[in-house]
Image (cartoon, grey):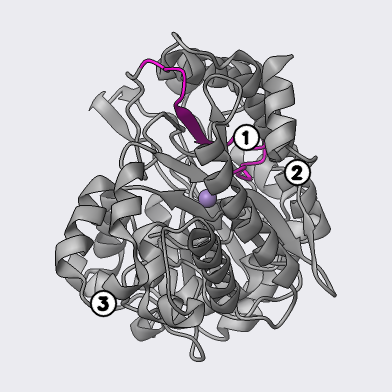
Amino acid sequence: MFFNKETYTSRRLELIKKTGSGIIILPGNGECARNFKANTYFFVQDSSFLYYTGINLPDLILVLNCETGESILFGNEASFDHKIWMGHQESLKDKAIKIGIISVLEVNKLFDYIKNYSVKSNIHYLPTYRSSTSILLSQLLDKSINEINAKISIDLINAVVSQREIKSALEIQELEKALDITREIHLKVMSITKAGKKESNLVGAIENTITTQGSYTAYPPIVTVQGQILHNFNYTNELKKGQLLLGDFGACSHSGYAGDITRTIPVSGKFTVKQKEIYQIVLDAQNKAVELLKPNVLFKDVHLASCMTIVDGLKNIGLMKGDTEEAVAAGAHALFFPHGLGHMIGLDVHDMESVGENYVGYDDEVSKSDQFGLKSLRLGKRLKQGFTVTIEPGMYFIPELINDWKSNNKKCAPFFNFDKIESYLDFGGIRIEDEYVITEKGSEILGKYIPKKISEIEQIMLD
Ligand SMILES: [Mn+2]
């Protein structure tokens, strides 16, 4: 547990109140086998379970009874054998007391507990993302996996999202702890990047620094000289002078809050003129977005404003033409900026994405567009004080996409100067990402500043 008893108790009581009636089942995660049962992947707890309990151990299930107001933790105490192999551990009962739960029952008692509950239609659970959880719910509720998937509780999803999307001061502190480590690894990469190294050398330095701090990565790092490949988890390239290195990586705080920062730096330590021009447009798009952040603004509008900055910038250097607003309305900017401006961040790097993007980033007022580019925007709804979000515009030259649009996208064709664009086919990609909290009147950057201006990056790399 990471916060005090009162924090977890009041979170659970609020969830009970918001859900209203019935029984809530929140299964934690189990260990996940790599290639045989005893050889497991690094354990990551389900983040909703973690939010309401703070217990980072496998094979536990939290049940909240909305009728009685009771919280029950189902889990088995460590066996004698387990203690021999794993060493002495605090009992589950003692752990539970620290988070305000006095009822701890063995897992097999959960089956009786559910069987004895008469109103089966009023059992709430979240969408699952691991087959082991689906199987547990299927057995528990005596329903097929398909039925389990069809009967997820929208009331519970909405209740959980409404709590977790507003970050408390304590949570902001945790996000900033994650950013302290994340800042350190970005500064490290800036200081050791040079031609002749491999991407894997940098990933090694990142992992080393994070592990030394007793932490772990929030997601697989993207460290690549091929930034135009959006999710490139391949670290085999050698860094060459003249290339850009895109680094999108972050560490978790010890309590599990994620850090997510992206920087793009020149391998040689100095940007070329062409790189500076594109870089500055991306930075302008980020600044534009940050200027607009405040409660009640639609994040979709913030996204579109940053898209306009990108189109204006590209018009200035002759890659695009025509009316900026019309270009963005047609989705033309997505040739260079095919992803969304940002997402919520918290215990998950894409916070709460496991309950479904449409319940987290959208609502009755704003639904997701199916236009290329906008369909990848994870957050569109109105911002509230206490939201924590990433702002991560990017610009990429993806040869396959450019070639495809040149012959197939008649609607957007009038906005492009393809002759000029084709001289950028080997450019790669740039993304700049920081995290912000929405405050009463605007926003504040989370964590200590990580250099991102052209002159600042060049200065660090030359030192
Ligand atoms: Mn991100």
Q: Secondary structure at mark 1?
A: loop
Earlier in the chain: of badge 1 and badge 2, it is 1
Earlier in the chain: of badge 3 and badge 1, it is 1
User: Which residue: 46% across, 33% down?
Assistant: 221
Question: Is 253 covered by the magenta stretch?
Answer: yes
- Residue under label 2: 176
Earlier in the chain: of badge 2 and badge 3, it is 3
* Kind of residue indicated by mark 3: Ala
- Residue under label 1: 91
Q: Which mark is residue 150?
A: 3
Q: Is residue 311 above or below residue 189?
A: below
Mark 1 CB within 8 Å of ligand 1: no
Q: Secondary structure at mark 2?
A: helix
Q: Is residue 366 above or below residue 242?
A: below
Q: Report crowding for label 2: few under 14, some 14 to 19, many 20 or more residues within 10 A (C-alpha).
A: many
Camera-nearest residue between 59 and 112: 59
Q: Secondary structure at mark 3?
A: helix
Camera-nearest residue between 328 and 115: 328
Judge from the rendering whether residue 93 lies leftward or rightward of residue 409; answer left or right.
right
